[in-house]
Image: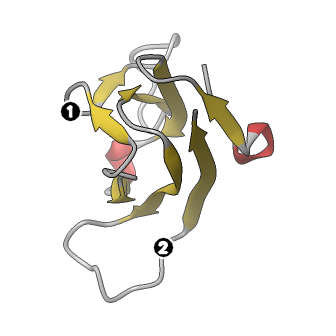
Amino acid sequence: MLEQASQCPIDLVSGQILTLRLPSNPTTGYRWLVQHPAANILRSLGPEVYTDPEEAGLVGSAGRSLWRFQAKAPGESHLILVYQQPWAPEVKPVKTFDCAVTVR
């Protein structure tokens, strides 16, 4: 489970599953968007899955966004996600998650 950029760089072996979980609060209008999926070495195993906060019912409470990828080919790349409002792509992202990934 990868939850923060400080866990990077990350080394994977072909076929290994990478699970990425980041804090998210879509009630603010901000979402994590995959800007660079490292498609040359990773294969997405589906869309983002959002989980509600443990304290459900609190307006504005943050939850977690989860993505799963499978290492598909040897190589090096960066998995990059940005936290921004999807309708305002010209505005600089509030956060950027950038992880160097190597598949062996």
Asked if residue 3 can be seen in this view, the reply is no
Residue appearing at x 20%, y 32% in the figure: 47
- Callout 2 amino acid: Pro
Q: Quadrant of residue 44?
A: top left
Residue appearing at x 60%, y 43% in the figure: 102
Q: What is the x, y in percent for residue 2? A: 62, 28
Q: What is the x, y in percent for residue 35? A: 36, 63
Left or right of 37? Residue 19 is: right
Dot 2 or dot 1: first in sequence order is: 1
Q: Quadrant of residue 82?
A: bottom left
Q: Nearer the viewer, residue 101 or 80?
A: 101
The crowd level at tag 1 (other Cα within 10 Å; few <14, some 14-19, many 20+) is few
Residue appearing at x 39%, y 86% in the figure: 91
Q: Nearer the viewer, residue 5 or 62?
A: 5
Residue appearing at x 34%, y 54% in the figure: 34
SS label for mark 2: loop
- Callout 1 amino acid: Pro
The image's colour scheme reads secondary structure
- Per the image, the residue denoted by label 2 is 93
Q: Residue furthest right?
A: 6
Which label sits on residue 47? 1
Screen quadrant of the N terminus: top right
Q: Does residue 79 sit above or below 55 in this rendering? A: below
Q: What is the x, y in percent for residue 7? A: 77, 37
Q: What is the x, y in percent for residue 81? A: 45, 56
Screen quadrant of the C terminus: top right
Which of discs 2 and 1 lies nearer the camera? The answer is 1
Label 2 to label 1: alpha-carbon separation: 20 Å
SS label for mark 1: loop
